[in-house]
Image (tube, helix red, strand yellow):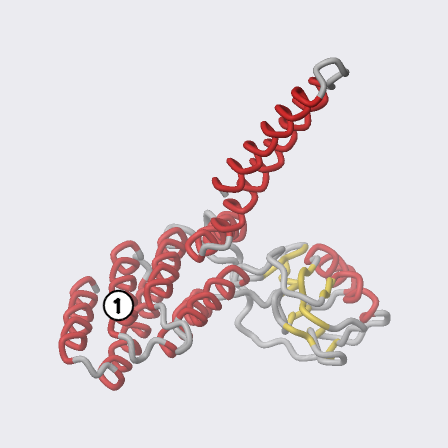
């Protein structure tokens, strides 16, 4: 780029010198030539900036950081300061409801469904959540009693699209980070360091969730739970973060050591017993995979040491 810039500048100076020496008696548009040179310099500078911007924006660490920021924003917006209403333990039976749309469920208007259920004295249990793919004709909910025009209400309350969206889906940035990690661990790329960077971001996300509460999905009207949403649990969130990384990095001591180290860090922050049990389950799975798949004796020793450190924290 520097060579192009210097060459263009030298050419412009040569043209200006030629114009001046051909015939000194004729009018020379000095302002026009100078303006053209300035515009050429601006164009070259813009090109250099654009190439630099593209090169840095497609860097894998930049992409991981951008998606991680999306995950941080999703956690801030979709988790709660205090625990919300617990859904009833008794299962709801009734009529299965289908909708006229299909594709990825992007958003659910819970207010419309809750108001409608309260008005008709029924209870709705959603069977899908934002981020799920809904085939045409597949049931999306169960309504405790048959009511006319049920499908119209669900068609109005549910938004479908051809792609997943982060509008109400906490797991969407998790899946994006997982995709980066899995591609990095593919035999053609074999980049465990990128996978380790993704696991570090997962640790940051779970540490941010530690003092907060995930929604339970119960919506009440008039003192009665009228709508139960299908929401992501802590178990499901951890499964989405760690299962594919562990499975695709089963032969990499580096990835498994990093995974056990990350679980240890999260366990130091997390205080809820059921969540710590989930972390223990993933640590057990990781060490089992290491004992079976890691061929390097030194790497296996490091995995065992990190697993013992995790056990000590618990």
Measuring from the top left, give residue 222's x and y in whole percent: 67, 54
The kind of secondary structure element at disc 1 is helix
> Farthest residue toward the bottom?
292
Give the camera-side residue of 49 and 36: 36
**Position of 52 compared to 308: left or right?**
right
User: Closer to the camera, 162 or 85?
Assistant: 162
Which residue is labeled 1 in the image? Answer: 260
Indicate left or right for 200 with 86 as reference: left
Residue drawn at x 65%, y 26% is: 18
**What is the x, y in percent for residue 30?**
69, 18
Tell me if residue 273 comes above or below residue 41 in the rendering: below
In the displayed structure, 305 sits above or below 297; it is: above
Which one is nearer the viewer's eye here, 107 or 48?
Answer: 48
At a point 48% along the width and 40% down the height, the residue shown is: 2
Image quadrant holding the C terminus, namely: bottom left
Task: Tell me which residue sits at (68%, 58%) in the image.
Answer: 110
Kindly tell me whether residue 83 is visible in this rendering.
Answer: no
């Amino acid at each position: 780029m520097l060579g192009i810039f210097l060459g263009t500048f030298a050419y412009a100076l040569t043209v200006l010198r030629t114009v001046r020496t051909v015939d000194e008696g004729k009018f020379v548009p000095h302002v026009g030539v100078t303006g053209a040179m300035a515009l050429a310099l601006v164009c070259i500078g813009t090109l250099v900036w654009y190439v630099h911007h593209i090169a840095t924006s497609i860097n894998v660490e930049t992409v991981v950081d951008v998606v991680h920021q999306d995950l941080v924003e999703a956690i801030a917006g979709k988790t709660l300061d205090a625990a919300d209403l617990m859904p009833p333990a008794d299962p709801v039976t009734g009529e299965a409801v289908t909708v006229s749309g299909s594709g990825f469920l992007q958003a659910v208007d819970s207010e419309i469904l809750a108001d409608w259920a309260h008005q008709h004295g029924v209870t709705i249990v959603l069977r899908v959540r934002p981020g799920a793919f809904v085939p045409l004709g597949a049931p999306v909910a169960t309504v405790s009693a048959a009511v006319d025009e049920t499908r119209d209400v669900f068609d109005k309350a549910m938004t479908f699209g051809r792609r997943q969206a982060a509008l109400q889906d906490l797991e969407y940035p998790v899946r994006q980070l997982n995709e980066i990690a899995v591609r990095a661990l593919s035999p053609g790329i074999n980049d465990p360091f990128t996978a380790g960077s993704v696991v570090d971001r997962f640790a940051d996300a779970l540490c941010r969730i530690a003092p907060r509460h995930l929604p339970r999905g119960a919506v009440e009207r008039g003192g009665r739970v009228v709508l139960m949403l299908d929401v992501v649990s802590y178990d499901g969130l951890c499964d989405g973060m760690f299962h594919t990384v562990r499975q695709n990095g089963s032969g990499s001591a580096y990835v498994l050591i990093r995974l056990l180290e990350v679980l240890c860090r999260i366990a130091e922050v997390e205080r809820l017993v059921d969540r710590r049990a989930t972390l223990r389950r993933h640590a057990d799975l990781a060490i089992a995979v290491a004992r079976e798949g890691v061929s390097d004796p030194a790497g296996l020793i490091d995995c065992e040491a990190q697993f013992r450190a995790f056990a000590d924290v618990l």
